[in-house]
Image: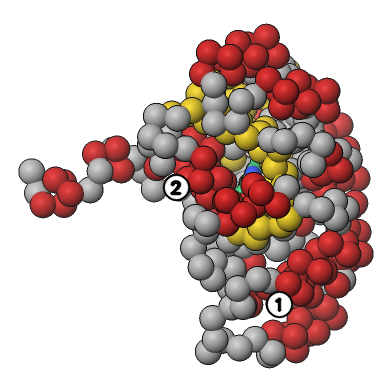
Amino acid sequence: MSLLQKTIRADVQATQAYVVAPSAGMLKLDAMENPQGMPAALLDELAQALKAAELNRYPAPKALELETALRACTAIPKAAHVLFGNGSDELIDLIIRACCMPGDVVMSPVPTFVMYAVYSQWSHARFVGVDLNPDFSLNMPAMLKAISANQPKVVFLAYPNNPTGVALREAEIVQIIEATPGLVVVDEAYEAFADASFMARVLEFSNVLVLRTFSKLGLAGARLGYAVASPAWVEQIDKVRPPYNVNVLTRIAVQFALEHFDAFNAQAKLLRDQRSVLTAALKTLRTPNGDVEVFDSYANFVLFRMPDALEVFEALKNKGILVKYVGKGHPLLQNCLRVTVSTETENQQFLKAVQQSIDEVASKAA
Ligand SMILES: Cc1ncc(COP(=O)(O)O)c(C=O)c1O
């Protein structure tokens, strides 16, 4: 056994690093990014704003101007506090680290966003997934039973859920909050597309935190997420945050975006409209081996199931179109693909390519 093998944790050695599929030159519909980019006029202004960045200095301890801009655009309850993270990914990690000792339980309905389980593992917490129903609705009796049996320190509820696109009912969230002995994180990464939010109620309970991100709105490259909770929760979680975790360029860029938030909201509206068109078109697809099952989505992606999904995924890739094959993630996701909602032109390009891919796969099998 080498020195490295003796030194690096066995579970780290046994794990693969997070895989980001190569996408150079491809139509990238795999990662829920906003395809629209910042309007050109705004980009010029942003470049000016970034000139003010003092790159020779560490960021100020609190991103106060950013927070003021955020509160002006978002209905964050006045008495709630905000904690910024390097993406909401980082905040998920910090929440688990602040709450869990080795062996403590983190819980979530599954399938869901994979990083809840990954960060649990790195904190030596035990991730307990509670299977959703086959239509991806919540299995409430199973959830309540699992909460009672495992007494989780943290429950993550992706609202709406990734990769299913399904949203819990608000009453279900409340029931889980009331049953949970620890913290319930309502992860609203896709809030801009959902017409639903728990934000207004974040202080109504003693154990709720709402998580958001700018990634899906068009700022995935800036890496900024934020947590909203009562001051006491934020004060504790802040203790495990690395100093200076949000860099000065990100602060300026996102503050700028917030000052021009109408442009981002308009882009989100376009994607919501396109989601209906894309969903309807996917529902009309037929394959020789069976129908395509499409799950109505509250997010900026659509999950669908079809026979030979892996083959269709590969055929799409050969045509330069990258979607996400999620079939390996969980037994309930068998034969499922997830596609990001894009512009009208790109969606049409994708739809045409799916039909061609279905036909190709069928003719190969014949
Ligand atoms: C439910 C959910 N939460 C959080 C994230 C992480 O977002 P980010 O780290 O880009 O803020 C994602 C990303 O896909 C997600 O699907």
* Residue 287, image quadrant: top right
Q: Give the left or right position of residue 210, taking residue 119 as reference.
A: right
**Residue at (66% x, 49% y) in the render:** 232
Q: Is residue 299 above or below residue 175?
A: below
* Circle 2: residue type: Tyr
Of 250 and 171, nearer the camera is 171
Q: Nearer the viewer, mark 1 or mark 2?
A: 1
Task: Give coordinates of residue 196: x percent, y percent.
Answer: 86, 38
| Depth check, front residue: 18 or 93 | 93
Secondary element at tag 1 = helix
* Quadrant in which the C terminus appears: top right
From this viewpoint, which residue is outermost toward the front? 232
Relative image position of residue 4 (x, y in whole percent)? 16, 52
What is the three-letter code of the residue carrying label 1? Answer: Ile
Residue 68 seen in the figure? yes
Q: Quadrant of residue 225?
A: bottom right
At a point 60% along the width and 59% down the height, the residue shown is 85
Q: Are marks 1 and 2 in contact (CB under 8 Å)?
A: no
The quarter of the picture where the N terminus appears is top left
- Which residue is identified by label 1? 252
169 sits left or right of 99 in the view = right
Q: Is residue 53 above or below residue 102?
A: below
At horizontal 38% and vertical 34% (from top left) the residue drawn is 102
Q: Residues within 10 Å of mark 2 (few under 14, many from 20)?
A: few
Asked if residue 216 can be seen in this view, the reply is no
Task: Say which element carries label 2.
Answer: loop
Please tell me how crowded label 1 is: few (under 14), some (14-19), or many (20+) other residues with Cα within 10 Å.
many
Give the label on residue 18, or none.
2
Left or right of 26 on screen, residue 102: left
- In this picture, residue 292 sits left or right of residue 2: right
Residue 191 position in % (x across, y down): 80, 45
Residue 169: % across, % down = 82, 25
